[in-house]
Amino acid sequence: MRASIIFLLLLRLLTKSVGADEPQPRTYQNQLRRIENAKPLLADYPEYFEPIQEEAHFEAAAIVNDEGADLHVRAWRFSYNARGIIEMPNHLRAAETAVIMVHPWAIDDEWGWRSPQPNGVADFCTPTKNAVAATHTKEVVDPFLKRLRGKAACVMYSLPGPADPVRTKIYRSFSRVPTAVEREAGEKELRQVLADFDYTGEPLPETLTLGNETPVIDYFKQFPGLDSGARFNHEGFWNLPIPVCTSVSVDPQDVVIYDAEGYAPLREFLKKNGVRHVLLTGYATDMCYCRTTAGYENLSKDFNVFLVADASLATFPSNTSPRFAVNAAISFAALNQLITQVSWVTLEPEQK
């Protein structure tokens, strides 16, 4: 009997010892303090983003509070139940943070992948709108990536398609880092592939057949607002290997994510590299940014995700500016995601 008691005591001590080093959950004090005279959010780039304005703003405690934090990310979310916007500081370890750019497509730039003529569509769907996105990348996103490169665990880009033989010569992937010689050869090969393609599609239909009963239905069936298929884009357009746009200063150590490989390899790569946090940038806020392989709907299952809202653009049909579209997309995402902005992401002074 005595031996049994001693055994149980030793077992209990051993169990406590094994679990002593494990991080323990903390009790979060969900106390909201009203912020008086709160300023509009995301107001740094009004040409791209219509500022967020809401009557009630509250301050809350930090959600992420890493020991030894050197990357500080103020963020906010919206709650109907709280009747307003909730802002909070967050303190991250940069070495455990990945910066990901969703779909920086090289459309209508120096690579030579072009919007098909006369009526083909790709990315933001017209050459004029693609030019707006390219300027945004150069002015907003690329400087943000440069500022965090070398401090964050990795800088990454997601692209459509598989890890094909051409692009894996140019970009680092999950499994390999190409040499300088391979990069040079791959770039020449890719430029040639893109240059050889016939970017000619069909013109708009000159006549449509409309029935008497439902002419509106017949009209849109034959002439939809967005047709990116072979009819207007030419057969094989979407099979071309899409590079990272030239508005981004790609570093040899940056990593490309290939959508066709699925989310599991991306999750495994991030976990293997000790990543716990993700700063998400890229396009398009209303589609690829949320629903593709590196979109926040996937990443937020496994990582602390912060949407860098002014480093993203939504598609903007019927408008010359994306500012209202990206405002709407981010406002909706804020129900279940933490939102930040470029100026709210700061490094410790010695790392700036």
Image (spheres, helix red, strand yellow):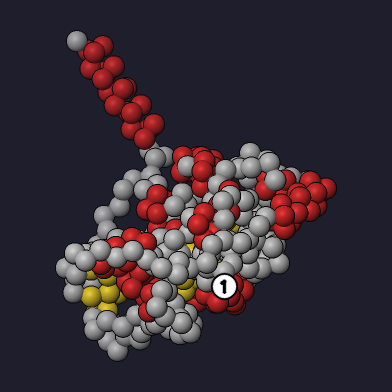
Point out the residue furthest to the right here: 181
Point out the residue furthest to the left here: 81
Point out the residue furthest to the bottom here: 37
Choose between 160 and 293: the one closer to the eye: 160
Question: In the shown orientation, is residue 86 left or right of residue 46?
Answer: left
Q: Which residue, given by chain and number where applicable, does mark 1 sit on?
A: 127
Q: Residue at x 62, y 74 (%)?
A: 138
Seen in the picture, residue 22 relative to 57 is either above or below; the reply is: above
| Total tally of numbered discs in the picture | 1
Seen in the picture, residue 17 relative to 168 is either above or below; the reply is: above
Residue 316: image location, x then y, percent? 42, 74
Callout 1 environment at 10 Å: few (<14), some (14 to 19), or many (20+)?
Answer: some
Choose between 247 and 69: the one closer to the eye: 247
Residue 203: image location, x then y, percent? 52, 67
The answer to whether residue 183 is seen in the rendering is no
Q: Residue at x 35, y 69 (%)?
A: 329
Where is the N terminus found, in terms of image quarters? top left
The answer to whether residue 161 is seen in the rendering is yes
Choose between 243 and 338: the one closer to the eye: 243
